[in-house]
Image: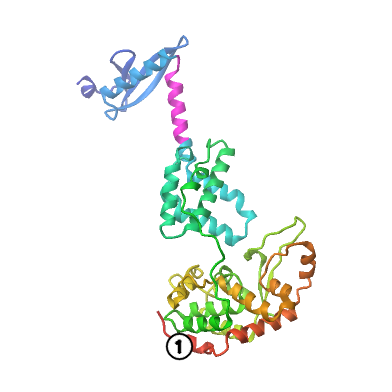
């Protein structure tokens, strides 16, 4: 009652309780709890907080806690400062904050497409669940819960790749003094087993032709169908097709599509090697597809834009879903066109096996092959690319019919 009735004056006043606890009544009218105590022979002051936010009962409880620290030989003021500092550090050292520092440190060593995949996977599948948790407080069960959600999509391989990235963040945190152990190393045994094997692919020419026909009869956006046809003809990695900017296809010289090294999945085997652009010979049918696409998407930045957000590239799943709807789930994936091309062409032209590997942008196994590849063999690659396009598109519908075909 005395605290409630107390009125401010021109000078600060004290309302004493007991054991050194008192209310400081400031001229502004604020009422602040203070605790006077002695430590190592010196008089000190501990700020507890304002009244009525801190009640009399709570203030006395904090006074008693401070007295207990004194009996244990600790300075209550120093302990409180350390607790505040720890709280601030916990905010700064959340998993998301540490992960972004790790990403910033490493992204320059990755090709842009891989870097975007790394941070994108963390933003979509990890940060929403444990992003605001301090790295020191994340345990094995919490990580298992996050990865179980990914496995249930189902995306077992993605979950395992995500675990590796989370582990890399913790290793960075440990080396930076922000964590003591890596819980991601303990969850491996709890993850669903990954069925190893090659990605499913149709390797028979007749079946591949039939697949192309069935896909192009599906109800789908013509841009997606044209992306699939170009993928089948050029057999580049699907990610390279989906993220193609018009700047790469505008003003094509000598029917060659040049994919910059930065967009390729290439890794250097020797420190003296240099990353190279990938040259993709474009057969006649491929230039027809590009001409058709120019009329559809040529005003935007992407050859294959997202159907909902034209300022973004096509979804990485768009071509795969199209193949699934056509009845090829578990039988053929977009990446499978590389196996289809390799199987058919190596069987027909075994003497060109090294040129075929070069067309697939395979990394040379040794420097001898690397020297061989530097010759490029452009003319033979152009010839093989045209032969492949003629084979795979035999009896296929003309490009203009794809534009007029059924839409989803």
Q: Is residue 80 magenta?
A: yes
Indicate whether 91 appears above or below 247. Answer: above
Q: Is residue 291 magenta?
A: no
Q: Is residue 249 visible?
A: no
Decide which of 132, 332 is in the foreground and name it: 332
Magenta span: predominant SS is: helix
Residue at the extreme top: 41
Q: Quadrant of the C terminus?
A: bottom left
Indicate whether 231 appears above or below 368. Answer: below
Tell me what residue is drawn at x 36 percent, y 18 percent: 35
Question: Disc 1 designates what residue?
Answer: 404
Indicate whether 370 appears above or below 16. Answer: below
Tell me what residue is drawn at x 39 percent, y 20 percent: 46
Crowd rating for badge 1 (residues with CA inside 10 Å; few <14, some 14–19, many 20+): few
Residue 385, located in which quarter of the rendered image? bottom right
Tell me what residue is drawn at x 45 percent, y 18 percent: 75
Query: Magenta part of the protein: which range?
Result: 73-88
Q: Quadrant of the N terminus?
A: top left
Decide which of 125, 89 is in the foreground and name it: 125
């Amino acid at each position: 009652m005395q605290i409630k009735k107390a009125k401010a004056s021109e000078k600060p006043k004290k309302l004493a309780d007991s054991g050194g606890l008192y209310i400081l009544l400031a001229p502004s009218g604020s009422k602040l709890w203070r605790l006077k105590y002695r430590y190592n022979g010196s008089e000190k002051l501990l700020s507890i907080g304002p009244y009525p936010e801190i009640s009399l009962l709570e203030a006395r409880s904090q006074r008693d806690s401070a007295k207990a620290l004194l009996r244990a030989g600790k300075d209550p003021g120093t302990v409180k400062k350390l607790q505040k500092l720890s709280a601030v550090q916990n905010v700064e050292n959340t998993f998301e904050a540490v992960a972004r520092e790790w990403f910033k440190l490493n992204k320059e060593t990755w090709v842009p497409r891989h870097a975007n995949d790394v941070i994108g996977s963390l933003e979509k599948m990890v940060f929403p669940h444990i992003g605001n948790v301090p790295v020191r407080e994340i345990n094995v069960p919490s990580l298992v819960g996050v990865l179980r959600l990914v496995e249930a999509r189902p995306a077992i391989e993605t979950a395992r790749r995500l675990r590796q990235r989370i582990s890399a963040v913790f290793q960075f945190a440990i080396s930076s003094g922000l964590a003591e152990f890596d819980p991601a190393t303990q969850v491996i045994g709890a993850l669903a087993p990954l069925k190893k094997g090659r990605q499913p692919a149709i390797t028979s020419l007749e079946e591949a032709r039939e697949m192309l026909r069935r896909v192009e009869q599906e109800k789908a956006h013509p841009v997606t169908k044209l992306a699939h046809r170009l993928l089948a003809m050029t057999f580049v990695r699907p990610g390279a097709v989906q993220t193609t900017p018009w700047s790469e296809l505008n003003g094509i010289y000598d029917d060659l599509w040049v994919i910059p090294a930065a967009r390729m999945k290439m890794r250097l085997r020797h420190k003296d090697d240099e990353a190279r652009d990938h040259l993709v010979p474009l057969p006649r049918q491929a230039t027809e597809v590009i001409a058709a696409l120019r009329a559809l998407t040529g005003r935007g930045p992407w050859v294959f834009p997202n159907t909902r957000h034209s300022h973004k590239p096509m979804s990485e799943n768009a071509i795969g879903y199209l193949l699934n709807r056509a009845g090829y789930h578990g039988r053929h994936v977009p990446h499978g066109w590389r196996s289809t091309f390799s199987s058919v062409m190596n069987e027909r032209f075994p003497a060109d096996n090294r040129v075929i590997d070069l067309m697939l942008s395979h990394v040379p196994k040794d420097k001898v092959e690397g020297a061989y590849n530097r010759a490029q063999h452009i003319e033979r690659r152009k010839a093989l690319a045209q032969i492949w396009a003629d084979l795979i598109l035999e009896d296929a519908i003309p490009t203009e019919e794809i534009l007029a075909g059924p839409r989803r």
